[in-house]
Image: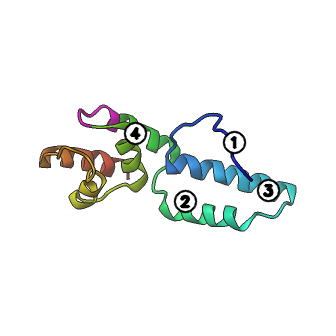
């Protein structure tokens, strides 16, 4: 199947993707259709990675976007990866042209840990 054009594009977090995939899975099971290998693997993958509910991920995302040096793509990465320490957080910021102070890193980590 060839994609000719994008109709729309929006960023979503992994918990939101998981919710959508679980709805698709429930619909397939209700109708008696078999799930494809790709769908099963996708569901398995997000179940392994997701650590928040969709509502909690939206809350964390909005809190992160209020911070001064926060870009939306980085906020989405933080919500999806849920870093546990400064090194993991620095890896997310590795391509940026600025560095965060230890206080800024700790503030982000506090926001992340408050959602767990």
Find out whether the residues at labels 1 and 2 contact each other: C-beta distance under 8 Å. Answer: no
- Image label count: 4
Residue 78 shown left or right of residue 38 in the figure: left
Mark-to-mark CA distance, 2 and 3: 18 Å
The spot of residue 42 in percent (x, y) is: 61, 62
Find out whether the residues at labels 4 and 2 contact each other: C-beta distance under 8 Å. Answer: no
Report which residue position mark 1 lands on. 4
Residue at the (13%, 49%) spot, across then down: 102
Q: Of the residues under marks 2 and 3, which one precedes in the sequence? A: 3
Mark-to-mark CA distance, 4 and 1: 32 Å
Residue at the (79%, 56%) spot, across then down: 28
The spot of residue 34 in percent (x, y) is: 81, 64
Mark 1, other Cα within 10 Å: few <14 / some 14–19 / many ≥20? few
Residue 66 lies in magenta, yes or no? Answer: yes
Mark-to-mark CA distance, 1 and 2: 28 Å
Splitting the image into 4 quarters, where does residue 22 fall? bottom right
Report which residue position mark 2 lands on. 46
Q: Secondary structure at mark 3?
A: helix
Viewer-proximal residue among 98 and 83: 98
Vertical relation: 31 (above or below) 70: below
Q: Of the residues under marks 3 and 4, which one precedes in the sequence? A: 3
Report which residue position mark 4 lands on. 61
Viewer-proximal residue among 84 and 69: 69
Number of the label disc, if any, that sits on residue 113: none
Viewer-proximal residue among 41 and 109: 41
Number of the label disc, if any, that sits on residue 28: 3
Read off the magenta span: 64-69
């Amino acid at each position: 199947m060839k994609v000719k054009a994008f109709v729309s594009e929006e960023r979503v977090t992994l918990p939101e993707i998981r919710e959508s995939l679980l709805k698709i899975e429930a619909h397939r099971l209700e109708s008696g259709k078999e799930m494809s290998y790709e769908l099963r693997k996708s569901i398995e993958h997000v179940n392994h990675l997701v650590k928040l509910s969709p509502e909690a991920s939206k809350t964390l995302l909005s809190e992160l976007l209020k911070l001064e040096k926060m870009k939306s793509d980085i906020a989405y990465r933080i919500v999806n990866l849920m870093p546990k320490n400064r090194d993991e957080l620095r890896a997310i910021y590795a391509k940026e042209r600025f560095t965060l102070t230890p206080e800024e890193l700790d503030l982000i980590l506090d926001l992340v840990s408050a959602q767990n």
